[in-house]
Image (cartoon, rainbow, N blue to C red):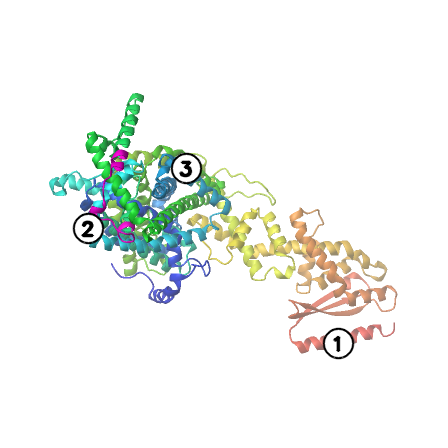
């Protein structure tokens, strides 16, 4: 069951390339993104939410750190020993899939195709929730540097969401990759060092916990933190039933830290080759990073007794303690001296809060059970004592940090976390737009979603409406988790039930031990993901109905777009044919449009291959005119040619499902027919020249009728084509007015014939002229040597003319040897001199 399913030779070769693959793509070179580049690119989406993982775990455990730690340990085991192997197997089978939904279409059995519909809907919802979480979180982080902006927190979140959307729409997702690499790399490297410092400091100095309460109260009074969740009693004093309930709830909340894991295989199409090796290594390293950061954060939170602070990351509180104690001048309990000014400030805060609370009560606005309200429940004197102490602590912290490395550390931490959270929005925008584009490619969403900018704009519009409604990260995390957990379920189930042909395509015998090992990886993922799903459904039931309703609505919209109604078509989808030059094609169903677009991509790739391998070089026409001709003949949207040229150096990505791949291959397999079709219009241009100019050499009185001249011109201009073949094709030719895209190609061949005819016909036209003057007999053998194939080969054309056109005889020979060419040329010259010596 644990036997490797990877081909030994392939594994050895991939392992040998691993040192290079680790750093490839960091400077946007090579065959794609290497391991570190891929991790840095997705760091914004995969790692940013980890900054809130500790907060959510402690919040779910009602402030009990021990319960939160054990819940995270179980989650980490499920991730590393269940989800990771399943994702690795899926990446090995189809590294270009681009997510769980496309993976079902690519390698899953037909019975599971409905999962791809649901997966697309939930991933799109996930993208929207990513924008909401990241923008709110970025606004929260800004409070670390500028707490006075707390009243404008939601407005800032709206601005951040709009700003990143504007950047991506203006630059385009592909041009924004360097931003993700730089920001993700800086955040990842900084976080590794900073969290290592936090962990060691927490282990060595648990007494620094005296700073925690003062920091939390200061954040609460300033309005940065809206709710504080603390353990109300010792964990040993509560019953096992309550412990188990809190354990499950903490698990369901802490799952949010793994939300970006799905982004790694989804970005696999940009990975360096071999892609599966890059993706698999990235999956392992990313899992280690996520687990280790969570462990360090939770351990420090337990040692320093940090509660769950809604609206502010636990990580930032840990950073503030480190900045003061390790990188600053340090704070001791005896340094905290309460002054009369501190007491006066505390009294003023109490009076202002009391007035505000009274005003809210008069307006009928209920006040929540915030940390500040808990303080206000105290008598005035006790409130002043506690808040004055917190103010004195804030002054001591400020004095310990000012003009020290700790001050720079906090600025860097805040800026990097804010940047990575902003970039996480980019990951949500790009990921959601990519899923929408893939659904559009499958015909399940309108075709305009194929443009990523449209998908990005739609996601922003929905997010902008929901941000003021949701307001808190802890509110949206309930909904957010359903998306990526469903992705875990879909991927694992697909790997376990993988089709036999998908394994055979990767060189795995479906009845072999390797196949059983691969399916076992899927089974482990199923066990892990199903446990996560059960925990989520039982603990987040309040969010389940909303997610199910939203997912069902998007799925029904996909279904309607694909089939034109909510009733699935039983008959097989057939692409209707349209006459060449049809500028606007209206498809009744999205699936028909998808098949037509797959056909177009097949034709485009066939034409690009014909251009690349030199098959079109013989026409001596620039590639633009060839592409424009093909676009007209086969009703190809020009954007397909532009995309094909942009992806020239990249490995082709398969069509999203088997049906579309079959349509693509059918169109691509007609390369020879396409080449002949293009050659036909090349002949049309030359035939037009012959039709227009042959009359200049017709002389019926000398037995040289139009047919004789045309045949002679054809044989000289088409030295490599048999006489009867080219003559029959010309006889079938009828001059007509051609559409501009066709004529602009044929015209080049017309001009080529017009330019080449004087060079090739010098001998025969001279003889015709002499015959017209009666200087040489009408019955004559004419020989002409013509170079073809860029001068690499030669053709000897022999034309026998007689008193009548019926006596015309033509012979064509290939002269490959240089000696034969020289001999034949000499013989032709002698014949010519003999026939004209009496002139």
Marked residue nearer the N-terminal end (2 or 3): 3
Side (left or right) of 777 relative to 619: right
Question: In what quadrant of the picture does the N terminus appear?
Answer: bottom left
Specify the label residue 568 is tagged with.
none
Q: Residue at x 19, y 50 (%)?
A: 206
Q: Which mark is residue 206?
A: 2
Distance Cα–Cα, label 1 vs label 2: 105 Å
Q: Would you name the residue on which mark 3 appears?
A: 158
**Whole-percent x and y of residue 62?**
21, 39
Question: CB atoms at circles 1 and 2 under 8 Å apart?
Answer: no
Nearer to us in this view, 279 or 790:
279
Place of residue 618 in the rendered image (x, y in percent of width and height, measured from the top left): 63, 61
Q: Residues within 10 Å of mark 2 (few under 14, many from 20)?
A: some
- Foreground disc of the pair 2, 3: 2
How far is the residue under mark 3 from the one under mark 1? 87 Å
Lower position in the chain sequence, tag 3 or tag 1 = 3
Residue 150 counted in the magenta span = no
| Secondary-structure class at tag 2 | helix
Q: Where are the magenta residues, as a range?
A: 323-345
Give how far apart the Cα atoms at labels 2 and 3 are.
39 Å
Horizontal and vertical percent position of residue 834: 82, 75
> In the rendered view, does 406 fall on the left or right side of 825?
left
Q: Which residue does the numbered mark 1 point to in the structure image?
A: 827
- Secondary element under disc 1, as helix, strand or loop, is helix
């Amino acid at each position: 069951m644990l036997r490797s399913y990877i081909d030994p030779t392939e594994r050895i070769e991939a392992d040998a390339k691993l040192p290079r693959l680790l750093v490839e793509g960091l400077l946007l070179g090579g065959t794609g993104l290497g391991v570190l580049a891929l991790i840095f690119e997705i760091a914004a989406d995969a790692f940013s939410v980890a900054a809130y993982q500790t907060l959510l775990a402690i919040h779910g455990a009602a402030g009990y750190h021990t319960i939160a730690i054990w819940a995270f340990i179980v989650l980490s085991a499920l991730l590393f020993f269940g989800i990771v192997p399943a994702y690795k197997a899926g990446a090995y089978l189809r590294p270009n899939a681009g997510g769980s939904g496309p993976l079902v279409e690519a390698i899953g059995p037909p019975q599971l195709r409905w999962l791809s519909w649901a997966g697309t809907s939930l991933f799109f919802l996930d993208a929207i929730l990513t924008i909401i979480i990241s923008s709110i979180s970025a606004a929260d982080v800004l409070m670390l540097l500028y707490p006075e902006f707390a009243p404008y927190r939601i407005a800032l979140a709206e601005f951040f969401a709009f700003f990143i959307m504007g950047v991506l729409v203006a630059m385009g997702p592909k041009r924004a990759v360097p931003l993700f690499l730089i920001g993700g790399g800086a955040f990842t490297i900084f976080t590794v060092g900073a969290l290592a410092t936090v962990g060691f400091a927490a282990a060595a100095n648990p007494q620094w916990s005296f700073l925690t309460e003062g920091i939390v109260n200061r954040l609460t009074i300033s309005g940065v933190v809206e709710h504080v969740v603390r353990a109300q009693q010792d964990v040993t004093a509560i019953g096992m039933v309550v412990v188990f309930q809190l354990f499950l709830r903490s698990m369901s909340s802490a799952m949010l830290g793994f939300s970006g894991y799905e982004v790694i295989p989804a970005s696999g199409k940009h990975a360096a080759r071999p892609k599966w090796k890059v993706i698999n290594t990235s999956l392992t390293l990313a899992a280690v990073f996520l687990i280790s950061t969570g462990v360090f954060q939770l351990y420090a939170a337990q040692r320093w007794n940090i509660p769950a602070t809604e609206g502010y990351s636990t990580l930032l509180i840990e950073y503030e303690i480190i900045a003061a104690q390790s990188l600053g001048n340090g704070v001791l309990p005896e340094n905290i001296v309460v002054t009369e000014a501190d007491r006066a400030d505390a009294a003023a805060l109490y009076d202002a809060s009391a007035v505000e609370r009274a005003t809210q009560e008069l307006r009928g606005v209920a006040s929540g059970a915030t940390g500040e309200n808990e303080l206000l429940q105290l008598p005035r004197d006790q409130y002043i004592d506690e808040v004055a102490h917190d103010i004195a602590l804030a002054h001591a912290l400020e004095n310990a940090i000012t003009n020290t490395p700790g001050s720079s550390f906090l600025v860097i931490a805040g800026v990097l976390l804010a940047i990575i959270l902003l970039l996480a929005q980019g990951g949500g925008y790009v990921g959601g737009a990519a899923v929408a584009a893939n659904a559009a490619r499958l015909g399940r969403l309108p075709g305009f979603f194929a443009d990523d900018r449209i998908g990005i704009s739609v996601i922003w519009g929905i997010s902008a409406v929901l941000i003021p409604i949701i307001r808190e990260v802890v509110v949206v995390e309930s909904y957010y988790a359903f998306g990526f957990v469903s992705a875990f379920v879909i991927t694992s189930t697909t790997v376990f039930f993988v089709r036999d042909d998908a394994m055979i395509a990767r060189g795995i015998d479906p009845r072999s031990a390797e196949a059983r090992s691969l399916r076992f990886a899927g089974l482990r993922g199923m066990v892990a993901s199903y446990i996560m799903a059960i925990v989520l459904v039982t603990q987040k039931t309040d969010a389940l109905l909303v997610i199910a309703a939203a997912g069902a609505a998007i799925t029904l919209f996909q279904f309607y777009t694909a089939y034109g109604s909510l009733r699935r078509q039983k008959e097989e989808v057939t692409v209707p044919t349209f006459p060449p030059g049809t500028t606007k094609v209206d498809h009744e169903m999205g699936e028909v449009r998808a098949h037509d677009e797959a056909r177009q991509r097949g034709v485009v790739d066939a034409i690009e291959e014909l251009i690349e391998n030199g098959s079109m070089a013989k026409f001596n026409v620039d590639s633009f005119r060839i592409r424009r001709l093909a676009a007209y003949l086969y009703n190809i949207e020009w954007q397909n040619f532009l995309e094909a040229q942009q992806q020239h150096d990249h490995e082709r990505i398969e069509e999203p499902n088997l049906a579309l791949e079959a349509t693509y291959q059918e169109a691509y397999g007609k390369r020879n027919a396409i080449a002949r079709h293009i050659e036909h219009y090349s002949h049309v241009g030359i035939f037009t020249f012959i039709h227009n100019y042959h009359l200049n050499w017709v002389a019926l009185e000398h037995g040289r009728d139009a047919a004789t001249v045309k045949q002679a011109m054809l044989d000289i201009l088409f030295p490599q084509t048999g006489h009867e073949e080219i003559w029959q094709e010309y006889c079938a030719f009828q001059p007509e007015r051609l559409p501009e895209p066709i004529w602009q190609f044929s015209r080049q061949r017309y001009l080529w014939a017009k330019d080449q005819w004087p060079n090739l016909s010098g001998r025969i036209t001279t003889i015709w002229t002499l015959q017209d003057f009666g200087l040489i007999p009408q019955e004559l053998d004419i020989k002409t040597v013509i170079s073809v194939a860029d001068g690499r080969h030669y053709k000897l054309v022999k034309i026998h003319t007689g008193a009548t056109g019926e006596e015309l005889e033509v012979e064509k020979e290939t002269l490959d040897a240089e000696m034969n060419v020289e001999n034949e040329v000499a013989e032709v010259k002698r014949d010519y001199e003999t026939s004209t010596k009496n002139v």
